[in-house]
Amino acid sequence: MSTRHAGKAGSWYVASPDELGSELDDYLSEVPNMIDGSSLPIRGARIVIAPHAGYTFSGPCAAWAYKCLDLSKVKRVFVLGPSHTYYLDGCAVTTYDKYATPFGDFTVDRDVIQRVKGAGQMADIPKSRDSAEHSLEMHLPYLYKRCEETFGSPDQFPAIVPILIGDNDRDEEKNVGRILVPYLKDEGNAFIISSDFCHWGANFQYMVYSPENDPTKLVNLRRSDSRPTGAPIHETIRLLDEAAMDAVKSGSHDAFVDNLEQTKNTVCGRHPIGVAMAALELLAKETNDDTKFRFKITQYQRSNLVDKPSDFSVSYVSAYAVL
């Protein structure tokens, strides 16, 4: 085992601890002190959805998730992200024993990693792919800042459980969610679900548009097309993301999967979100209360308001659920 270095420091975010700390503090300070009538962090909010782009783009949105996250009783943090660097069928776990940030290291809970790996017949993430994967790494500096606030001394920080959730189908997501249910029940565990939302543009091979502002009636644009004469493209993107967010808030894993199958919305962390929703839905069924264990959306932002087909944008969402 060896330390996993912060491979994106200096490219996706500044490597200087002072500069990075100041940047994240600024983003966190812009979040209100109360959300949904509760002071922050929200008691029992041990699972969040947060974006993973460069902080210049997604940092302000991610701050909303991290400000809500309740770490007060947490001993380990599961980080579930999609694989960007290689095709993954199923799930995979880190082989490293530490992850580095500019602020300091996080220790990986190897015992839990092995238990989850065995239960889900998961693979190991190849070391080179692990080092290059930003969907896990981008959350750790924010988590470190919140751990400093909550625990003070790094020797009191929770361990982390990094897992890549690959190209799982509906039933496979439910199976992985079932494995995670006991961990969700334990107040000693928190969960970070890593995902951006709509990736729109030629580079993402997703250029849908609805002349009627109806996400069920989409046409495909080409980069060379003129600007649409109807509603702006970014309105279609907003409608697509709102439909996906409504599905997330519904508490129904099937509704979320159905929505993405219909719109093909390029939510890169759809499988981590799907696994989390499947697990939360199982918890709700155990309590016979389908109003519990549902995500609440706190923030929606985009990198750019697309006006013409040659533009592109990525959408960012922050959400939490109380466990």
Image: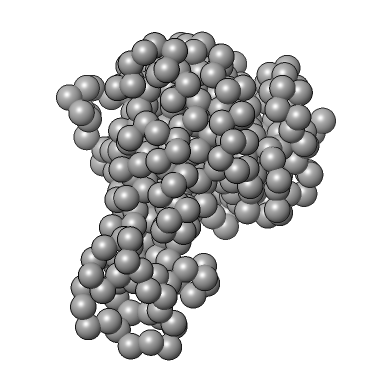
Up-down relation of residue 259 to residue 228 (above or below): above
The x and y percentages for residue 263 are 41, 58
* The quarter of the displayed image where residue 156 is located: top right
Q: Name the residue: 26% across, 41% down.
A: 30
What percent of the width, then of the height, locates residue 211? 26, 74
Percent x, y for residue 75? 55, 14
Is residue 311 in sight in this rendering? no
Give 45 or 19, whichever is nearer the viewer: 45
Front residue of 29 and 79: 79
Is 151 situated above or below 160?
A: above
Q: Is residue 123 above or below residue 215?
A: above
Location of residue 68 by image quarter: top left
- Residue 240 in the image: above or below residue 213: above
Residue depicted at x 38% and y 56%: 315
User: Which residue shows up at 40% across the image and 19% down it?
Assistant: 284
Quadrant of the frame with the N terminus: top right
240 relative to 47 in the view: left or right = left
Image quadrant where one finds the C terminus: top left
Is residue 256 visible from the viewing direction of this image? yes
What percent of the width, then of the height, locates residue 133?
A: 64, 48
The way the protein has been coloured in the rendering is one colour
Which residue appears farthest toward the left when viewing the image?
Answer: 37
| 233 vs 111, nearest the viewer | 233
Residue at screen point 50% across, 38% down: 274
The single residue placed furthest to the right in the displayed view is 1
Q: Quadrant of residue 208?
A: bottom left
